[in-house]
Amino acid sequence: VHFPDVERVEWLNKILVQAWPYFGTIMEKTFKEVVEPKIRAKNVHLKTCTFTKINFGEKCPRINGIKAYTKEIDRRQITLDLQICYIGDCEIHMDISKFNLGVKGVQLYGTLRVILEPLLSDPPFVGAVTLFFMQKPHLEINWAGMSNLLDVPGISVMSDSLIQDFIAARLVLPNRITVPLKKNMNIAHLRFPRSHGVIRVHLLEAENLVQKDSFLGAIRGKSDPYALLRLGTVQHRSKTVSRDLNPIWNETFEFVVHEVHGQDLEVDLYDEDPDKDDFMGSLVIKLLDVRNDRTVDEWFPLSKTTSGHLHLKLEWLSLVNDQEKLHEDKKGLPTAILIVYLESAFNLPKNHFEYSNGECGAKKIKNNKYLKKTEQEPSSFVLLTVGNKTQKSKTCNFSKDPTWGQAFTFFVHNAHSQSLHVEIKDKDRDTALGTSVICLSHLLKDPNMTLDQRFQLDHSSADSFIKMNLVLR
């Protein structure tokens, strides 16, 4: 008797087929009552946005298989991987400023993880459900009305990659959606669970790569290879080695691991060309194997190609709260990670003229049109910077008390001297609503190297704060 890791669930697909028409009715109502008002509020040019047709069609998503994890997981949770396949005949049209555009058919493939936790002893027996894709899902969209799309004010070119990035920013690790099923359930620790570790990848060299460059379309020459390394939404690119089928890189990259089970490190090799880069082979490495072995130094055969091997050294680095291990690395490699849980802000000024250096100093503006614009609440986003890396939060529209609810990770080289720089900006005027600088050495004063508090904003009002949870490991 054979019990495969991935099980077929035709009974569940039959339920989806039966429920799909009712799902379409619910989504039609959601698009009209929720999505349409949000689109109109995004930009003055989108105020006329109206959905003219919403039809999710007859073809529903299929679940090709489910894998249930039973080993090395918390006993109070259920973890499932769903292999999603959707070849849909949906049709959605909307009018914006007398222009018609929309979608006529979608294809999507990916692995969706579902975590049910915590398990409870009373109804509903599960406290919350968490959803996310392990890697970026494959997406193809058949656009309708695209010929006039560039003429619509305030609309940029929509593409499959743009939508993929939109999904990744919300539903691909480390991003996730958590829905509480029980009242008064605290889901903060479910939305932002602690990272499992860091994988350090030494991209060393390759050999016997395929020849991709050609001369006059006939004589094969050498290639100009480079590597793309991906884990979740994070991607690193190596340098390009010119005219070499046995390139040597000797580069090091690091990734924060948010899930060990089911997550893979993907490596693709390409030949750099002026027009379109040629694919030279790929490699997939299971993170669970690296964690178990701690260090892996091997030549890996490339797949999806006729020849080639890649030499990698992989190291698994555990996260600990031991301050003695925070000494600066002699090779200049990071020694710690800073996890920033960006929660919310309070009492943001409507514009940067409202306060100056913490003191009320409103400036008189003669332009009545500008004065009218500043009467509305700010649409704010946050820029977080450590060293030379800056990350940007999503934008919260029209609120002086915005809630972002996002997590960010930074690699730290010297916790004793580096700082976290925070800047809140207004999307519409690109002006600062407040700033803050937190020295990472403050975290070293706490036994758990954690700060969970409201931070006073500089260059803002006296009662403007930002709420963050900072963890150093």
Image: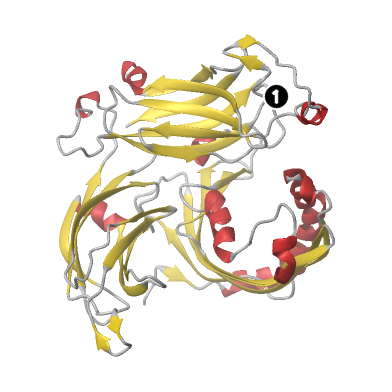
State left or right for residue 249 relative to residue 163.
left
Where's residue 187, x and y in %? 56, 36
User: Would you place residue 130 above or below residue 111 in this image?
Assistant: above
* Residue visible at 48% across and 51% down in the picture: 78
User: Would you place residue 40 above or below residue 401 in this image?
Assistant: below
State left or right for residue 6 relative to residue 312.
right
Which residue occupies the foreground of this view, 85 or 399? 399
Kindly indicate the quadrant of the structure image that contains residue 236. Answer: bottom left
Query: Outermost residue, top direction?
Result: 359
Kindly indicate the quadrant of the structure image that contains residue 166. Answer: bottom right
Residue identified by numbered label 1 = 350
Q: Is residue 19 visible?
A: yes
Where's residue 58, x and y in %? 73, 75
Badge 1: how crowded within 10 Å, few (<14), some, or many (20+)?
many
Kindly indicate the quadrant of the structure image that contains residue 432. Answer: top right
Where's residue 304, x and y in %? 32, 78
